[in-house]
Structure formats: structure tokens, C-alpha cells
Image (spheres, grey):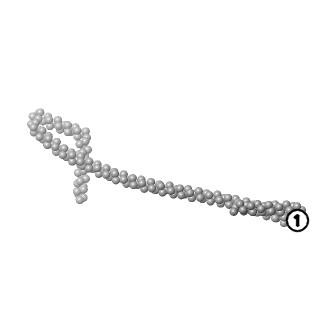
Amino acid sequence: MKKYNEKTEVLEKIADRVTSWIGSIQSLIVHTLLFLTSFLLPMMNLVEFDQMLLILTTVLSLEAIYLAIFIQMSVNKSHEKIEDIQEDIEEISEDIEDIQEDIEEISEDIEEINEDIEDIQEDIEEISEDIEEINDEEEEEDHIERAKNVILKSNVSSNKNEIKALKDIIIQLQSEIQQLKKDEE
């Protein structure tokens, strides 16, 4: 089988070369010279005209038969190549479809990631607001603590109006804290 394939390949190469040569300018020149020579032979009385026509007809018939075979071999080979190209195109089309599906999946993943990022940003904003509220509450508690310290440090003999004013401030601050807590709820 291997020898058959090798012989077939050699014959195909020869057929390709012959077909290629037949379609060339050199072939046109050689055939023209052969035809002119064959018609000149009877004119020079080297061969009879009828005999020349018989030989020329036989040679041309055989050449036509072989040319038809070589051309059909080239057509068959071209057809095989076209089929191979069509198969390659089908495979490429399938690959393109697969790539398009992958791109769609990636796009969906990107949309999901963007949604997750938006959710995370909202969570960060809420946490930032909570931190600000806690800081505000701590500042108010510091004010209350200072006010208590002032009251404790002040003399018992201090002015009742000053103590009352400080108590009012404390009450006011406490009511503001309660209001903030209600706003949070």
C-alpha cells in the first residue's frame, strides 16, 4: 500500500507538471513548431501528405486523451482542496460561535461584578455615615462629661445660677442625644 501511495504521488506530481507546462507559452511555441514542421515535411517531399495527416491525427488524438486525463486529475485535486477549505471554514465558523458564546458569558460576568461593586459602594457609604454618627455622639458625650466635671469641680458655694445654667446645658445636650438616637431608629 505504501509503494502504491508513493507511485501515486509521483504520478500526480508528473501530471501537475505536464498540466502546468501545457498551459504555458513554451508549450504554445513547441506545438506551433511541430505543426509547422509536420506541414513542411510534405512540401519538401520527405513524407507524403496523406501519411503526414494520418500520423499527425494519431499523435494529436493521443495527446488529447492524455491532456483530458491530466486536466481531470487537476480538477479532482482542486475539488479535494476546495472540500478541505470548506471543512476548514466550517471549523472556523464553529470556533467563532464558541468565542461569541464566551464573550457573552464574560459580558454577563462583568455586569454581575459591576452590580457587586455598586452594592459594596453602597455598604461603604452606609458604614461611613455610621462612623460619622458615632463620632458626633462621642463629641457630645465629651461635652457632657466636661460639663459634669465643671459642675463637680465648682464650689458648692458657687452661684446657683451658674449651676442651673450648666444643668440646662446638660439637659439640652441630653435631649439632643435622645433626638439623634430617635433619628437613627
Relative to residue 58, is residue 112 drawn left or right? right
Residue 185 shows in the view? yes
Q: Residue at x 74, y 61 (%)?
A: 179
Q: Position of residue 68 (x, y in %)?
A: 21, 46
Local secondary structure at mark 1: loop
Q: Of all residues shown, which one is farthest toward the top?
A: 43
Q: Residue at x 42, y 54 (%)?
A: 97
Q: Residue at x 80, y 62 (%)?
A: 171
Relative to residue 10, is residue 166 drawn left or right? right
Residue 46 shows in the view? no
Q: Quadrant of the N terminus?
A: bottom left
Of 11 and 178, which appears nearest the observer? 178
Q: Of all residues shown, which one is farthest toward the right?
A: 157
* Marker count (numbered): 1
Q: Which residue bears the numbered disc 1?
A: 155
Q: Position of residue 69 (x, y in %)?
A: 21, 48
Q: Quadrant of the C terminus?
A: bottom right
Q: Position of residue 132 (x, y in %)?
A: 70, 59
Relative to residue 109, is residue 176 drawn left or right? right
Q: Position of residue 36 (x, y in %)?
A: 17, 35
Q: Residue at x 66, y 59 (%)?
A: 128
